Amino acid sequence: MSARRHAAVLVIVAGALAAAAASAQRDVDAALLADIEAIKAIDNHAHVMRPVPDDRGFDALPLDALDPSPLPVGLRDDNPMFVRAWKALFGYRYDDASESHAQEAAAAKQRAMAERGAAYPAWVLDKLGIETMLANRIAMGPELTAPRFRWVPYADALIFPLDNGAAEAANRDYAAFYPAEEKLLQQYVAESRLSALPATLDEYCRAVVSATLERHKRGGAVAEKFEIAYLRWLDFGPAAGDAAAATYAKFVRGGRPPAAEYKTLQDYLFAYLAREAGRLGLAIHIHVADGGGGNYDQRGSDPLLLTWLFNEPSLRKTNFVIVHGGGAPGAKHAGSLLSKSNVYADFSSWSFTMSPRLQAAALRDWLSTYPEHVLFGTDATPVSDRINWEETGWVATTTARQALAIALSGMINDGEIDRARARDLARRALHDNARKLYGLGSDPGDQR
Ligand SMILES: [Zn+2]
């Protein structure tokens, strides 16, 4: 290439960059973005850590049990957004994340924890502009209390009471995860004051499933979480009670149930549990998106697989939340399911795999059709020695608000809504929809 041609290319590149920056500015209503950044949010989904050594209660299925597999770019230690997070959270002074500088960030984080003690997690929420965080954890702790934190325990274990060997043989990630579920079920059985699984399905449903949900409710839970797409497909369907009871009774003391019979039992238990959750005023959260791990079965987590469940008449009193909103591949399908009166979706975790502009396109679909069913979420989560829930939470809360501003600015520019309506929709998505769904209205903090 000649020098002259090279110069011409440079001019074109520089022009394109300037045009992109200008178009980004044009795309966002600056006053609206400022309003959106000031809204104290309710975070529908996060894995907050207790500020104590060796906290393992943050996830029933920690991904470090799996074969090594690449992280998405947005979650890697070298994502420059994490440098911005350190600046915003811990007064970090550098523009890079070199080893020695990153050690300073880690030391600043330790100092912040030591200074604030049990108040540290709530202090982080203040920095993230989050009023209330739904903490998806096996157990809470004295640092994670209402009204700033609300509990979302795990319920998957309850629908897998039999030998899971067939599923373990089918998928290496299933094989890594089922033992954790079996351990959690033993915990739930013991907490239900039983020494072994009951002999009949009726008794299991009453004395273990319902008893566990009631215990969770008394412990402050607002929802039950399923990570079931890490364990089987989401293709729930009708299940006859007598067939389910026969399978349970035959295999509860041992032996490997045939896959089709076990699925019927699982489907029966899921519907029973969801009905009970509705009775107790607990929402059902379902991970619906791509998942971590090298053997995740993407075919099994399309939101449309949940259509039977959402249409089942006996479950219409249960509120369901499509956590992660189907992710990038499933966002449109998730959006179509928001037409059900009892179905909601959050856009947690999108900031780790989708740019603000990609998020905005998907959000605009949702906000244009069923805006009362859209929930903000971060999926704040520990990732590595350097990057923990504070940093991922900051990136998510920052990027998601940009995405909302782009989506709503586009709707204003196209004459679909005015600015007052845009502010109203942002407030609903970031706060009011979740407050209504979980009945958080009595919190004094909600008046802000
Ligand atoms: Zn999560």
Image (tube, helix red, strand yellow):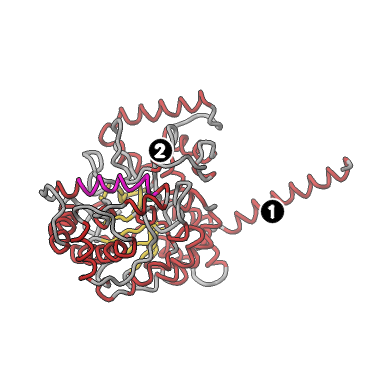
Which comes sooner in the sequence, label 1 or label 2? 1
The percent position of residue 360, horizontal first and vertical second, equals: 52, 59
Instruction: Name the residue: 42% across, 36% down.
Output: 89
In this view of the protein, which residue sits in the foreground, 141 or 400?
141
Depicted 287 relative to depicted 310: above or below: above
What is the three-letter code of the residue carrying label 2? Asn
For label 2, being within 8 Å of ligand 1 is answered no
Q: Residue furthest front?
A: 255
In this view of the protein, which residue sits in the foreground, 4 or 198?
198
Q: Main secondary structure of the magenta part?
A: helix
Instruction: Name the residue: 30% across, 28% down.
Output: 115
Instruction: Please tell me how crowded label 2 is: few (under 14), some (14-19), or many (20+) other residues with Cα within 10 Å.
Output: some
Instruction: Name the residue: 46% across, 65% down.
Output: 422
The percent position of residue 448, horizontal first and vertical second, equals: 30, 53
Image-based side of 430 in relation to 54, left or right: right
Image-based side of 90 in relation to 263, left or right: right
Instruction: Please tell me how crowded label 1 is: few (under 14), some (14-19), or many (20+) other residues with Cα within 10 Å.
Output: few
Query: Can you tell which of label 1 and label 2 is closer to the viewer?
Result: 2
Label of residue 388 in the image: 2
Q: CA distance from mark 1 to mark 2?
A: 35 Å
The percent position of residue 373, horizontal first and vertical second, equals: 37, 66
301 is within the stretch colored magenta: no
Residue 34 visible to the viewer:
no
Label of residue 19 in the image: 1
Q: Provide the secondary structure element on which disc 1 rests.
A: helix
Label of residue 438 in the image: none
What is the three-letter code of the residue carrying label 1? Ala
Instruction: Name the residue: 41% across, 44% down.
Output: 393
Depicted 158 relative to depicted 176: above or below: below
In magenta, the rendered stretch is: 174-186
